Amino acid sequence: MSSLSKAQLHRQAEHLVDFVNKSPSPFHAIDVCRKWLSSANFTELKEKQSWCGVIKPNGRYFFTRNGSSIVAFAVGGKFRPGNGTSIVAAHSDSPCLKLKPVSRKTGSGFLQVGVQLYGGGLWHTWFDRDLSVAGRVMVRDGAGGYSGRLVAIEEPIMRIPSLAIHMDRTANEAFKFNKETHLTPILATVSKALNGTDSTAGGDMEKPAHHAVLLERIAKQLDVSVNDISDFELCLYDTQKAAIGGLLNELIHASRLDNLNSSYCAIEGLINSLDGKQALEDDSHVRLVSLFDNEEVGSTSAYGANSALLESALRRIQASCDGVNLTSFEESIANSYMISSDVTHAVHPNYSEKHEENHRPELQKGPAIKINANQRYATTSVTSTILKDIAKRNGIPLQEFVVRNDSSCGSTIGPMLSAQLGLRTVDIGNPLLAMHSIREVCGADDVGMLVKLFEHFFSEFAALDAKINVD
């Protein structure tokens, strides 16, 4: 069992629930992380500015890209160019519905909102949920410039109603729907909108890109004029709050656990590893967390894992330190190690046959190392040995996951980053039920176990790596 007390495990579960509730979009999640790191004495850097002379041993730093990805790192007191980096990587995004550039729709007396599908969601779970919108709005300022503002409307302003069983008697046998026409949320009734503020909602006048009532609600939330809104990136989200559940409070019921679970644990583990004035003094490595956007759609963006984001950060850290030489970056990569953290499939009691019989991760039994012979995961015997050693010495249980041979296997950012950079990598994640549903389920105790694993990884890997003899 984990060395953590029940109170510590419960506190970590509560913190994850709070993090999820404050993060209805990737922009919000990264903003929470930014504030969290700043309160832990991390200094914010800007990619547009030079880091030379800024990064120092024992220093703590972070920067963001696009407001939806973040890199945070702490420099060991004995770090020198060429030394390694201890990395935990995860992603900030989740499957969702996003507003189309022209979202204005009407049908049968209703104002509706056109949406795009983002990622591979279990879309049937979005029916009959109390939905709203959150994300980033580009707003004109008084000086002729633009700034990004975060918005999250808490009220349930949208809904996708199911068709009554009386009109489709086959619904319980095979629920089928058209993703373009049937997955369109209702915003309001035309009659109510016409009697209220949306004078263009149902007329034949010039048609704006979005319903006026929606724009006005967003503008009100931001305390700006509708005319000051230039554009936005808004996703729909379930307004039901994340909560600790189960008869014995052993479960977490929430949206976006894939992958806010890992994102929370990574940042919390990094900060906890720095507890105490001497925490970094004897460390010869850099401790780094990178949270990427767009994993759910392949990671190929300027702020996804398939970009130069991590490589750029690692190169700049090396180049900013005294004593750098032409091969410092390459030496550092060979001395580095990455944990790719993404949730894994917990065995489902109603569908246990879907799991390979000897690799069935369970909730409440710790994170699972993910292995795949076809390199869908980046774990090797070397990288798993390192993590198992750290876990064993600190009383943290680990499980293992392998997909069945007759089942397809998902992937993570692990193989992608490992191949790009030549990094030793292990794939790991907390078990999850109902992955990609609008409401997912994880074990409450698993959160604290993964936080503790990351904390010990950051503080112990450099010393352990000196004992690993594999080239």
Image (cartoon, helix red, strand yellow):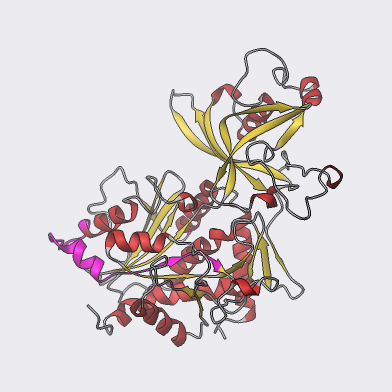
The one of 91 and 45 positioned closer to us in this rendering: 91
Q: Is residue 331 magenta?
A: yes
> What is the count of numbered marks?
0
Task: Look at the image and tell me in which quarter the N terminus lies.
Answer: bottom right
- Magenta segment range? 319-344
Q: Nearer the viewer, residue 275 or 5?
A: 5
431 on left or right of 302: right
Above or below for 429 versus 241: below
| Residue 72, x across and y down, in percent | 39, 58
Q: Nearer the viewer, residue 335 or 59?
A: 335
| Outermost left residue | 326
In the rendered image, the vertical position of residue 169 relative to residue 393, given as above or below: above
Where in the figure is residue 214, as x and y percent of width and height? 67, 30
- Tell me, yes or no, whether the highlighted magenta stretch contains residue 274: no
Quadrant, the C terminus: bottom left
Q: Quadrant of residue 192?
A: top right
The residue at the point 24 percent across, 56 percent down is 315
Q: Residue 48: percent from the left, percent from the top?
A: 30, 42
Figure quadrant of residue 361: bottom right
**Residue located at (53% from left, 65% from top):** 343
Q: Is residue 117 visible?
A: yes
For residue 147, side relative to residue 281 (left or right) = right
